[in-house]
Image (cartoon, rainbow, N blue to C red):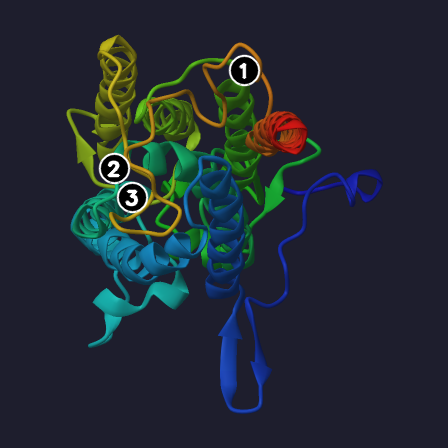
């Protein structure tokens, strides 16, 4: 679509490059975005897991397993659902640096592998799932920046000021409908998803702080919330996709997972209270199972609504008060003993 002189700046321009070189190494922005996103997700999860009483170093251990699983699962989902987008080279099915990671496939395989690893360590999976749910959204949001550099994941043609400029060769490569090839600016659906992911992440954190959310509850809302957004996104995307009954294949996946996530959340909330473990058996800090409680909250009226750090400070103050009382009682007992000994000595001198 042509733009007049007065509208030259009325769109988001495409970046001129999608990678840069460090010596002989070709660094793709798409891969860099996911690396930064994963790093931020680990940091967020460490903080949230520590607030639940767990060892933050456990997050690093789990990441060593789930990150490769997520990449493998994401690529498998992409290859299976969009075979036409696989690069026509012998290594095409593995070429993640050129784009093509299905979020649902990555999360599914990473969840299975992560649950297996936590079970091996003797740690309850549900609380960890709640801790990691907002962090996954942060990683996905940062990863979407890579779609901008790859000039992909765009929607229908638009004249909105935030329309994304897509060069002609990328329109052809993206497999968009022929009638749309004549347009130059399109809905930046990757940007919409980035914004939604961050909003949903903030909401899940807020919800966990202010309400009693049982294990798996926040993760279930992550599944429902992200998939619910994808229902909208699939209505505006025009890039290549497999179709079923006239709709994009991912539309059916999004609807199914939205319903599944909502039902999962309700069932998780209706389950009776159960104890859970956030530390491996035999760990020095472990004193048995931790009583089930809402994410980063406590059931103690004295600490209800406070963060885990505040609750820990209150507990330390209570312990100090108990120690002071014990010391005072011991001093009183010592005085009584001294007085008794003095009386006995006086009686003997009179004899």
Q: Earlier in the sequence, mark 3 or mark 2?
A: 3
Residue 316 seen by the camera = yes
In space, the residues marked 3 and 1 are separated at their CA atoms by 26 Å
Q: Earlier in the sequence, mark 3 or mark 1?
A: 3
- In the displayed structure, 253 sits above or below 55; it is above
Question: Label 3, label 2: how many angstroms apart (C-alpha)?
Answer: 19 Å
**Displayed quadrant of residue 303:** top right
Image quadrant in which you'd find residue 12: top right
Q: Which residue is mark 1?
A: 210
Labels 3 and 1 touching (C-beta < 8 A): no
Q: Which mark is residue 65?
A: none
Residue 99 picture location, percent across and down = 39, 59
Question: Residue at label 2?
Answer: 124
Q: Mark 3 highlights which residue?
A: 107
Among the two numbered marks 1 and 2 on one chain, the one whose residue lies closer to the N terminus: 2
At x 23%, y 75%, the residue is: 91
Give the CA distance from mark 1 to mark 2: 22 Å
Question: How busy is the neighbourhood of tag 2: few (under 14 within 10 Å), some, or many (20 plus)?
Answer: some
Residue pushed farthest bottom?
24
The one nearer the camera, 208 or 227, is: 208
Residue plotted at (55% across, 58% down): 149
């Amino acid at each position: 679509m042509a733009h007049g002189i007065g509208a030259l700046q009325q769109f988001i321009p495409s970046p001129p490059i999608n990678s840069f070189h460090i010596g002989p190494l070709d660094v793709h922005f798409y891969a860099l975005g996911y690396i930064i996103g994963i790093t931020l997700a680990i940091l967020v999860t460490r903080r949230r897991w520590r607030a639940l009483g767990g060892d933050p170093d456990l997050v690093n251990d789990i990441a060593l397993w789930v990150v490769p699983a997520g990449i493998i699962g994401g690529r498998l989902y992409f290859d299976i659902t969009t075979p036409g987008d696989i690069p026509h080279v012998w290594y095409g099915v593995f070429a993640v640096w050129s784009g093509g990671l299905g979020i649902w496939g990555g999360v599914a395989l990473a969840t299975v592998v992560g649950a297996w690893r936590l079970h091996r360590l003797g740690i309850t999976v549900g609380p960890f799932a709640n801790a990691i749910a907002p962090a996954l959204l942060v990683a996905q949001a940062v990863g979407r920046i890579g779609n901008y550099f790859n000039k992909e994941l765009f929607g229908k043609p638009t004249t909105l000021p935030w329309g994304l400029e897509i060069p002609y060769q990328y329109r052809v490569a993206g497999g968009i409908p022929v009638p749309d090839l004549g347009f130059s600016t399109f809905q930046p659906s990757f940007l919409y998803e980035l914004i939604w992911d961050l909003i949903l992440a903030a909401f899940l954190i807020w919800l966990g702080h202010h309400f009693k959310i049982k294990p798996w509850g926040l993760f279930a809302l992550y599944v429902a919330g992200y998939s619910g957004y994808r229902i909208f996104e699939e209505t505006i995307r025009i890039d290549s996709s497999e179709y079923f009954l006239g709709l994009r294949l991912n539309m059916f996946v999004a609807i199914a997972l939205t319903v599944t996530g909502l039902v999962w959340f309700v069932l998780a909330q209706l389950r009776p209270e159960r104890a859970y473990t956030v530390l491996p058996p035999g760990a020095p800090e472990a004193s048995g199972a931790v009583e089930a409680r809402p994410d980063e909250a406590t059931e103690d009226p004295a600490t209800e609504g406070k963060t885990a750090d505040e609750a820990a400070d209150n507990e330390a103050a209570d312990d100090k008060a108990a120690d002071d009382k014990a010391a005072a009682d011991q001093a009183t007992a010592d005085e009584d003993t001294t007085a008794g000994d003095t009386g006995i000595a006086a009686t003997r001198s009179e004899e």
